[in-house]
Image (cartoon, grey):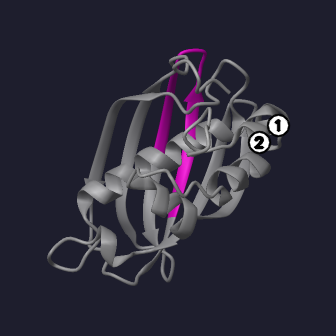
Amino acid sequence: MPTQTHGRLPPELLQKFPSMSPVERLNALLSNKAPNDQRFTSQFLESECKLHDFKQLSPKSALVTFAFKVSRNYCNVSGNLHGGAQAAFFDLCTSLALMSIGQPDSWLNGGVSRSLNVTYLRPAPEGEELIMECEIVSMGKSLALTKGRLMRESDRGVISTCDHDKAFVPSKPGWKL
């Protein structure tokens, strides 16, 4: 198995990552294929989640929009997007938003969750096209607050919302960006 220094990016891309634009970073993270990555999030990031829009609101805030279709893999027994999957997708996508504008030694690894509060409003059936907006509300040296909103693409009906409080921690050895 080839050695990787990070769970998402090969070493040659890691070197360029800090100097990439936010959109280049997001596209790199979403398009990188890691066939030996067995985490359940890999399929979602590699095949299903697409960058829809990016707006930098200030040096430390941004609004990043992702698009994906509700896959059967993530549905509950009623045929709707599972609440746990929604929480995981909020966790992933708000972290990607932080990584898009992070700086060396600050947020390039997405940090770790302190709290993730999801409010579920309506179901999202299998096959539904969805849009997820992720806003970086505040990004300091060690703490960040992000908000997310998952909506139907067709009419922007809100499926769920989240508040995601994150803490920056250095990457473990071998994973440093």
Image location (x, y in percent) of residue 48: 52, 69
Q: Can residue 67 be seen in this view?
A: no
Where is 106 relative to 34, above or below?
Answer: above
In the image, farthest residue toward the front: 1
- Label number found at residue 59: none
Residue at 55 percent of width and 21 percent of height:
171
| Dot label at residue 16 | 1
Give coordinates of residue 172: x percent, y percent.
51, 20
- Above-or-below relation of 16 to 111: below
Which quadrant: the C terminus? top right
Q: Which residue is drawn at 41% across and 37% down?
A: 164
Amino acid identity at mark 2: Leu
Magenta stretch contains residue 137? yes
Q: Is residue 29 left or right of 68 when viewed as pictured?
A: right
For the residue pair 54 and 77, the one nearer the viewer reads as: 77
Let me know if residue 42 is in the magenta part: no
Q: Is the magenta stretch mostly helix, strand or loop?
A: strand
Residues at circles 2 and 1 in contact by the CB criterion of under 8 Å: yes
Q: Mark 2 points at which residue?
A: 13
Figure label count: 2
The span shown in magenta is: 132-147
Q: Name above or below for residue 156 compared with residue 105.
A: below
Between 170 and 120, the one lying in front of the other is: 170
Name the secondary structure under disc 1: helix
Residue 101, position as x, y percentages in the image: 71, 36
